[in-house]
Amino acid sequence: MANTSQPVRRTALLAGGLAVLGLLSACGSENGTSGTPPPSHSARSSDAAPSAGTATDPGTAAAAGTPSDTAGSASASARTDGRCHTSELRAAVGRPDPGAGQRNFPLVLTNTSERTCTVYGYPGAAFVDASGRQLGPDPERAPGSPETLTLTPGASAWAGLSFSSPEISGARTATPAALLVTPPDERASLKVEWTAGAVPVGGNASSVSVTALEAGSGP
């Protein structure tokens, strides 16, 4: 009987020890002292980095507004630089003033804006056909002494456009569809319908001349 009880007690002790180890292991897992460690902070930050917030970055939004701000500044500059711009003017061809073998036309520029502006020098002029192709060379500038002219809203300035009558000069002619008038120091032109017939575009005595601007709407 004694020999039989010893193995039973050792088995009981061994089972009890395993139970205690199991309890200790369970407690350690609950307290976070064993098992797989949680992800580090740097790993979580890396996972969050590719966010959609980049598209609405305030700096990007501010940069996108720059072009409109620049356009506003350019518009303000155009209103305060003093010179009359093409968009602020209307062009017209006045009644012809016939001379001895000459045909003379006043080119009139009128200030249609609500501000006072200035013009100085010679306007550009070019005869064109219906397709916009220029007919003949650019007019020559007649000798003169340009002055700065101040145009209040509604005021005008004029320049003389002259050429020899083709019937007398024998120059080669063409009949323009329009006259393009470019204000001094401007690039854009104003288109005026031409209804005064043929003009010289080549050959002898075919030159056309334009004078400097003067105050008023014609002689």
Image (cartoon, rainbow, N blue to C red):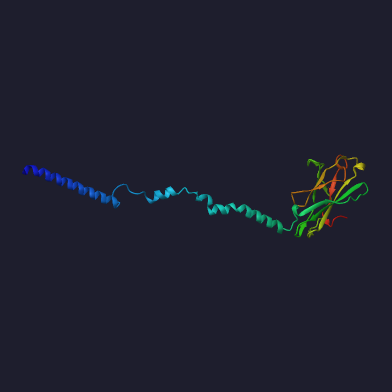
Work out whether residue 90 can be spotted. yes
Rendered location of residue 130, percent (x, y) = 80, 41
- The residue located at (51%, 50%) in the rendering is 54
- The answer to whether 173 is drawn above or below residue 104 in the figure is above
Quadrant showing the C terminus: bottom right
| Front in this rendered view, residue 129 or 31 | 31
Work out whether residue 33 can be spotted. no
- The answer to whether 10 is drawn above or below residue 81 in the figure is above
- The residue located at (67%, 55%) in the rendering is 74
| Front in this rendered view, residue 15 or 76 | 15
| Front in this rendered view, residue 27 or 181 | 27
Left or right side of 42 for 88 = right
Quadrant showing the N terminus: top left
Q: Quadrant of residue 114?
A: bottom right
Q: How many tags in the picture? A: 0
| Front in this rendered view, residue 136 or 117 | 117
Q: Quadrant of residue 126?
A: top right
Rendered location of residue 23, percent (x, y) = 23, 50
Q: Which residue sits furthest right?
A: 100
- The residue located at (87%, 50%) in the rendering is 105
- The residue located at (53%, 51%) in the rendering is 56
Rendered location of residue 211, percent (x, y) = 84, 51
